[in-house]
Amino acid sequence: MSDQQHDYVALEWVKGEITDTLRQARQALDGFEVPEHAEQDIAECLACIHQVHGSLQMVEFYGAALLAEEMEQLVLALQQGRVGAPGEAVSLLHQAFAQLPLYLDRVHDARRDLPLLVLPLLNDLRSARGESLLSETSLFSPVLLALPALEAGVLAQRAPSDLPGLLRKWRQMLQTALVGLLREQDDATNLGYMAKVFNRLESLCLDAPLAPLWQVGSALVEGMLDGAISNSPALRSLLKDADRELKRLLEQGIEGINQPAPDELLKSLLFYIAKAERPTPQMRVLKERYGLDEALPSSSVVDEERARLAGPDRDAMRSVVSALCEELVRVKERLDLFVRSDRQHADDLGSLLAPLRQIADTLAVLGFGQPRKVIIDQLAVVQGLAQGQREPNDPVLMDVAGALLYVESTLAGMIGTVEPQGREESRLPTTDLTLIHQIVIREALLCLQQAKDLIVDYIDADWDRERLAPLPELLTQVRGALSMIPLGRAASLLETCNRYIREHLIDEPSPPSWQQLDRLADALSGIEYYLERLAEDHEAAGETVLDKVEQSLDALGCTPVELEVPVLDEVLSPTEALVMRDLQELDDPHVVKSLADVLAHPVSELNPPARQVPHSLLPPPPDEAPVDDELREVFLEEAAEVLDALRDYLPRWLADLESKSALGELRRAFHTLKGSGRMVRALVLAELAWAMENLLNRVLERSLEPGPEVPRLIDEVLQLLPGLVDEFAADAQRQRDDVDQLAARAHALASAGGAGDAEGEAGTEGLDRQLLEIFRAEAETHLDSLNHFLEQAAEHLPLQVSDELQRALHTLKGSAYMAGVLPMAELAAPLYYLVREFKAHLLALDLDEVELLFEAEGLFRQGLQKLKDDPLAAIDGAPQLIRRAEDLLAQRLEALLSVPVSAQRTRRDPQLISSFLAQGMDILLDAESLLQRWQQHPGERQELNDLLDELTTLGQGAHLADLEPVDELCEALLDIYGAVEESSLAVSERFFHEAQLAHEALINMLDELAAGQAINPQPARIRALRELLDEALDPAATGLIRTDGGHALSISELGAATAEAAQVEAGVDLDDEIVTIFLEEAADILDSAGQALQRWLDEPDSAASLLSLQRDLHTLKGGARMAEVGPIGDLAHELENLYEGLLDRRFSHSPSLASLLQKSHDQLAVMLEQLQEQQPLSDPTPLIDSLRAFRQQGVEAEAPEPTEPAAGSDPELLEVFLEEGFDIIESSGAALQRWRAEPSSRQEVENLLRDLHTLKGGARMVEIAPIGDLAHELEFLYEGVSTMLLQPGEALFDLLQSGHDRLAQMLDAVRAEQPVPPADALIAEIQAFGRQPPVEPPVVAELTAPLIAKSEPEAERPPQDMVKVSADVLEDLVNLAGETSIFRGRIEQQVNDAKVALNEMETTIERMRDQLRRLDTETQGRILSRQQVEAERLGYEEFDPLEMDRHSQLQQLSRALFESASDLLDLKETLAGRNQDAENLLLQQARVNTELQEGLMRTRMVPFERMVPRLKRVVRQVAAELGKDVDFIVGNAEAEVDRNVLERMVAPLEHMLRNAVDHGLESTEVRRAAGKPEQGRITLDLSHEGGDIVFDIHDDGAGVPLDAVRRKAIKRGMIEEDTPISDREVLQFILQPGFSTAERITQISGRGVGMDVVHEEVRQLGGTMTIDSIKGQGVHFQIRLPFSVSVNRALMVQCGDEQYAVPLNTVEGLVRVLPNELEGYYQFNPPRYEYAGQTYELRYLGELLKTVNKPKLLGLSQPLPVLLVHCNEQRVALQVDSLVGTREIVVKSLGPQFAAVSGLSGATILGDGRVVLILDLLAHVRTSQAWVPVPRALSDLAADFTPLRPRLVMVVDDSVTVRKVTSRLLERNGMNVITAKDGVDAMSLLQEHTPDLMLLDIEMPRMDGFEVATRVRNDPRLKDLPIIMITSRTGQKHRDRAMAIGVNDYLGKPYQESVLLESIAQWSHAHA
């Protein structure tokens, strides 16, 4: 492997691990000497070395891997005891352990793997285990070339006539020379003979596999002649081996040159060349070709590298150099001190001599000569200064300092590389340019990461192309940067990615496939990986990575375009640049682009995608400038090389079609031809190469199997390419039909994707009966034409062949083949050929021919009779008739040809050709015009008939003129036109495209004929037409050719939909993917068609609406037939025909027609919904018959009602519809109220129109026709208002309100699984209203102006984007935001703790500083005292003791401690600043978190007014049914409520309103008699009170009949008759289950199952419900629910030892009161406190919570906090022990266990991790006020009448299907279900839930059913839980074991639903 192929980045990755593993191996080897652990240690050592060996093999470093392998073998020999001297072997292994890491470092640094460096060590290791030694040759591994074998034709051309004689002569000459060399006689002459032999053999074997042997031999002989290689026995032995190869060649002949020489022989010969020190020219060529310098470096290089390898390793060198640098720093500091002093004491410099000598010695040891010399020079200078020989002036000292700096910088630079004499030529210079490159690469990587993020955002945003808008510019910037580094190839590949993104992700509307995205991701990731490698190592080889990138782009169909950035040899001056620009602008203004323009706007795409197949491969325009001659020559040379490569690799690929390398080389060759050809404008050649490259791309990506057609096509192209190259060389490029055909075949194969032609099954079963019937009818028509001709022939003979006869036989033949009736097709074919030839040669039919036709007519009739029973039965007499017809035709033609030349018609007569040209060109031009007109009106037949006549005439003329290619193409066109005429082929865009191409080909043929050129056949066009014919459809599924003259659509609107046959309902399998696409399109089409139909019904004269309907139905029909959905296609086809008639004014608008159209559209919607649900489609035949009857008779036809499928076939879909439907009813009801209040608001009308349209579509999707019909009619009304046809008024509003109410009733019925009756009467009323003539709105300028002004802003307001988010996801987000607040609180706590610690630290530091000051004072005092004594003794009294600069060690330490204290204070200030920054950041984060929380909570809040229309509708419905007049008023409806709360409260509120209307409000007569208004009044008020939502429901009815309630309670045994009970307690009975005072049961109420459910729902929501009733005045219900928030501000209070959180929104005020004052307030009875003129009831929080009875006030002097709370009309002052402060808290649920505990809103977690309860003070206050002792009897009764709840069943099964099916069954039967996927999951759930019953499987992972049942029975809490086992194990032993465990019932799978439900009922009752 060459160095360029080594992956040094990979080596860098594994080098560290290898070093660690070797260290472990060395440690294990050290333990080998201890006998008791020897075996274990040697095994561990062997395992470690084996890992190292494997890693080195993985990264492919040969030398290091070889060394590791020898180490492994030696350790293995040690383990097996095969080493004679174990001690020596261990020593060698230690040496190898030290050598291998050094060798790897050297390889990484020098970028060269030289196994020769470790050859001595390798041989030592081998010698230790007794193996033979390695030579340099064994490590010599040149890159040997593999040449492909020559083809047989080339061998034949190359072989001389007397090859054996020549080879024999050459061998004799070689042997003579070898004998001379052996005798060492006249070496020059013998070597000359040998050179001649080798040269001739080289010429003979040129480019053959044997050629390298003779080339090497020639170079070797040349070296021996030059003296560079000496004659040696080993070399002579190798030359003898070459003679043996010559002998083999003599024996095998010319084929022998295709067998290469042995690799060992070549390696041995090349070794001598590599060893030569003075190579000759030939040897230098071979050295470069085979990489010999890399394979075997010179001995000097090897010795030098070995010396370096033996030196210290990098780490040791780095540590030594670092120590030297530190020593130099110390020397500089001493020198600096001397420079700054007075320089009087030069001898102080003597202290520098010792360190300088040490530095010099160390540098000498390291081999750093130049730095050592500098140090020695400065050593002499310093010594002179120290001895006073030189003056220490500034110049001298500065020179010394500069020299030291030089040495220091030199050593500092060596710390990184530690290579004083490294190979600098192999590295990039470590300059600023390299750094710039690294910076650019890092920035490019950041941009690529941004690009990937943009693509991920694009995918996450549901293919929103706006997300990709910045991407092209971003990638262009990266590509420009890479181009300038330069990394040209990477820039080119990145630009290709950018081009793909622009064209396919941004420009194309449809999203890409996941496979395409994967390939794009591979490309971008590959470029990113390539840049990462360069960022880590600028020498890393990454071309293989870029090859993978290019493969990914090729698979995407994008070929990289090399970006050529023009670079001038010399820098232009500004003037020269301007002149050059002006010259270019004069030459071609479009060429002028700056470099920035080029980089920002890449080269335009030269390679169109494969789907854009050119019709013909054309040369460049004649006026185009010729290509430069030099460029042309370069291309021709390259083309020759590419052709050789193609010839070389094609046989290899044919030998192994799975060979990706050979196939890749073939593709690369065509890719090169394409790119180079386009560059030199060899366009015909280049486009053919592109076609082949595109084909091979498909083969490479395995989307096309390389069948026999692909190699055959490649071979044909290869045969054609040399001619194209020659034409380009001669500047004679031209359009060639053979080239076009090859290109077309290539593109066709590529687009086919490897799909082969499917052959149909033979036999009658494969025939379509419907098609046979159509063929019968068509054949009858053609036989009538035949009989008509026979009647004419009976009158006079001979008779010329008529066009009618020829066309009849031609069409009969084609339609018989199409229908599969082969006997009739075989009979018609010879007759047609007979008639055609007679007409072509202007021969008249005589008696023999007419008799033949007469007999044939009878045989045809016989064949038609057999169609019903056996269409494939042979026709009696047909073979004989066929032979007669063929013989008769042959005789007549032979007779015609035997006519003498003078009498014979000259073939290709010029006059005949001229006549044909004149007539043919006119015919073709007319035909082209006819084709264009037909394309615009494909339903018309006239153009088709004219085309058939024109082409028949043209074909006859071509046949007469012997123009076979023209005749064949005309024949093919006539075949497809005939198929269309008989309605067996449907027209489409592809049909007209192929026909147009065929017409153009005919015109080209006539042009060639006119120019005197040979006419090129067009097999591609004929094949394409035949393929169209093969794909012909059942005529019943097309219907595009109309016989009634009806207008049809333009072909641009047909689409591809008519390309498939209609579905036969019983036997066709639908393609799921096509059906899915069709359903998506069909839904939009039906919506559009429905709107257009309504517009037309409103404006019957609107042609635009009809045209839109016709287009929509045509597209729907085509899509249905493409998806093989026949019934939808048939009905859409009939509707399309009807709309055509309406456009043509053949029909007119009528009510019956409108009804028929609406029912047809509804039926289409029903069938689409059935198709969506994969249900059988309804039969549309009655509707189709009605449509046909209407079209044919023009009279009203009564359409049958389509059968209504059962609603709710799919529960999941129905559930989705109901959820959406109720949302729509709510929003539309609110919008209707707003519109009614402001009739001028068009925005509300549009909202209503959109809502009703959505509801209609959803209803029809779930097959609920009554809802869809009513919504449809209401939509019409809103459309009328929207288009100003209807004016808003009370009548309209009442009608709309009735419609909305009816829709709501229908939805309620669907939800209750009740039948939904149609609203026929209401629909009729709506239709009647819609048919009223439009009323002009009254013009009131004064009123309308403000309204218009007011509505304009609303109309101009852009619609806001909405997104649906799952409620669970939103709940999770709220919880996560709350968790964020908790963590932030904990961080705040820690920051505060750190602040406290810093304050304590500051106090400690101040205390320490004070102590140090006192220590310093004490120290100075002692010094002064000592100095005074000393001065008195010595007599130095005039000196201050401090001036002597003598300090004790103690004073120095005290001063140092003082400085350390100052440093500590500075550090504390820094930490305090950082802590303050953290507090500020936390404060900002708190604000952001609060906004996030509020935003998330706002997303959960919905306005209550959404429910108002629904509640009003309930009141209206009940009032209407009861005949009561009710006024329902809602107060504060705009208030927002949590969506979950609102959804759960809808049913309770509805029930209470029904009760209020039914029971509460009296009838009109009673109210009138009681003096009340006749209109009853119900009010619903919504308010917020503290943390609660309060619903107040009042009615002004008669109130609750307390006596009746009491009697009912006594009757039911709830109380005794003499039990004393208050009215308030009596009211509580109506909340009991089943309690009702109604005298009769109605649909509205009276069952006694309402108020208890309401109360239970309120209780589950954590709320309370109170009832007040005043007789004769009404009832007041108050429902109080907690306002759910997840984050709130709370006041933290302390009560006793506990801390609580009180939400701030529940606290009215906060005061502080002195303890003695509080003591006085508590003396009142009851205790009270007055504040601000208000009196508050005084309570202690502990007493309220029942935790502490009385507050502790004695001995307290500080004021105590009192919370002021206002609840209802009561005011309470709550005293707490202390306040902890306010904080933001996260509300956490307490779980189901504490849900019933009143007064608790939840809990929160403090920063220190403590859990604190959140108090609902208002609930506590209300509880304390409303608490009334309940009599014992009543409480007992209440306990007996606990509310019934649904059963809770646990389903435990590992099958998802069983869990889902069983859960649905149980939920449908009113049970609640929890599921577990296995036993472990079940036991976990049982810790939290106690189900009423368990359904248990046996076989489950982790824990089976038996173990679960055993654990349940052993659990005291669960031991009585009923268990029903449902399992597929129905054996008796399994049943016995289950029953022994204690299972209650045992059922087998699949279970019967009724049996399971009975068992559940039995055991759950028993358990209860």
Image (cartoon, rainbow, N blue to C red):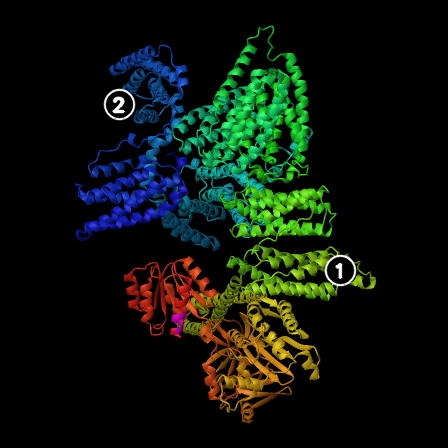
Magenta stretch, main secondary structure, is helix
Q: Position of residue 1914 (x, y in %)?
A: 31, 71
Q: Nearer the viewer, mark 2 or mark 1?
A: 1
Disc on the earlier residue, 2 or 1 = 2
Which residues, given as a range, are shown in magenta?
1961-1965
- In the displayed image of the protein, which residue is found farthest to the front? 795
Relative horizontal placement of residue 772, taking residue 108 as reference (left or right): right
Residue at image position (30%, 63%) is 1935
In the rendered image, the quadrant that contains the N terminus is: top left
Most foreground residue, 1528 or 393: 1528
The numbered mark at residue 1287 is 1
The numbered mark at residue 234 is 2
Residue 1868 falls within the magenta-colored stretch: no
Most foreground residue, 437 or 1728: 1728
Most foreground residue, 224 or 1696: 1696
Is residue 1813 visible in the rendered image? The answer is yes
Q: Position of residue 621 (x, y in %)?
A: 63, 25
Crowd rating for badge 2 (residues with CA inside 10 Å; few <14, some 14–19, many 20+):
few
In the rendered image, the quadrant that contains the C terminus is: bottom left
Mark 2 to mark 1: distance in Å?
114 Å
Q: Amino acid at mark 1?
A: Gln
